[in-house]
Amino acid sequence: MKIAFFSAKSYDIEYFNKFNKGFNHELRFFETRLNERTANLIQDEKAVCVFVNDKVSKPTLEILHQKDVKLIALRCAGFNNVDLKLANDLGIKVVRVPAYSPYAVAEHTVALILTLNRKTHKAFNRVRESNFSLEKIVGVDLHGKTVGVIGTGKIGAIFCKIMLGFGCKVIAYDLYPDEKLKKLGIEYEPIDQIFEQSQIISLHCPLTPETHHIIDEEAISKMQKGVMIVNTSRGALVDTTAVLAGLKSRKIGNLAIDVYEQEEALFFQDLSGEILEDEEITRLLTFPNVLITAHQSFFTHEALEQIATTTLQNVLDFENEAELVNEIKI
Ligand code: NAI
């Protein structure tokens, strides 16, 4: 089947071409994001493949429909960027990759916590400059600390187990508590208890209308002074303005984010020669206790292989009119 890829990076092209050998789809790659202006690049492709920051909203979907596109294949797990109802009304199916190495995201979350806590990023630079001082890089033992996890699905569950291995007390909030995690010693609590009791709070729930700005001014007001907030899930779970105020007031002791509310205009691009227009990220970058990575939690070989093979299989299933096991239904 012919597939038009948007937001294609070198690694997408490499992995999809490599794993397409067994599928024989016809792949066309576009570097640009999919939106109402770029949708016109589509010629006779019946499937489009998009990533997290391609906005598949009404105007874009209408053009896709005019172009007779029948399938949107998300090469990611989250689907908050697609107007599912309209896609359904227009008869366009939407498939995704529900799991691609949840270990990758959980492990990156831990990497952020360890880096921010023990300031290895600062130590690395210091030592390279022959500065062997330990001033201002003291951390804390994670052992014995309380970690609050919001969302204990595939990624959150792995993250919980890793933190148990560190000797942390792990408490969690989820709409559907996981009995297996409970047996391992994870205690499910109401969300306010997570805010009040945790020294580290990590977000692993999807972005939905209910979870939008789940970390806002009110939530922060309930947290312990010096709390570490970690977000490797979706940017808009966190109200950036409220978090900036929390950092300035010293209520928030550390912030690690791999996702950012306004990341669409920034992430996955080299803007090192540009003047950043986004006032909030530029302010965040000035804090010594803020660590930002640019949506790289998923970025391991295993995950890229899984993303490519599952996406190509999703398209093949559609072509063969087989059951779409990874269809997102509304
Ligand atoms: P999952 O679907 O396995 O787990 C999500 C969990 O969140 C479920 O247990 C669900 O019950 C829970 N949940 C849903 N609504 C909730 C609410 N209102 N309050 C509390 N919990 C709620 O998803 P998975 O695979 O663990 O991924 C989680 C999120 O991680 C994704 O939605 C995506 O946004 C993000 N992600 C980020 C990546 C990155 O590179 N930074 C890569 C992959 C996923």
Image: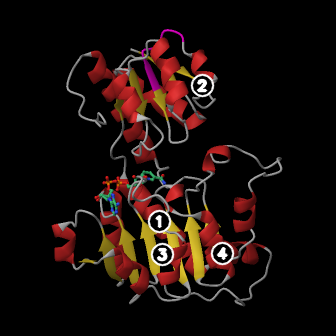
Residue ID for mark 3: 219
Q: Magenta residues?
A: 43-48
Q: CA distance from mark 1 to mark 4?
A: 23 Å
Is 44 included in the stretch rendered in magenta? yes
In this figure, which residue is indicated by the disc labeled 2? 36
Instruction: Kindly give the residue lying farthest to the top in the view shown.
Output: 44
Q: Secondary structure at mark 2?
A: loop
Q: Is residue 163 left or right of residue 280?
A: left
Q: Which mark is residue 109?
A: 1
Q: Main secondary structure of the magenta part?
A: loop
Q: Residue 245 got which mark?
A: 4
Q: From the viewer's perspective, is the residue at label 1 or at label 2 nearer?
A: 2
Whole-percent x, y for residue 215 in the image: 49, 68
Seen in the picture, residue 176 relative to 74 is either above or below; the reply is: below
* Amino acid at the residue labelled 2: Glu
Measure the C-alpha gap from mark 2 to mark 4.
36 Å
| Quarter-of-image position of residue 194 | bottom left
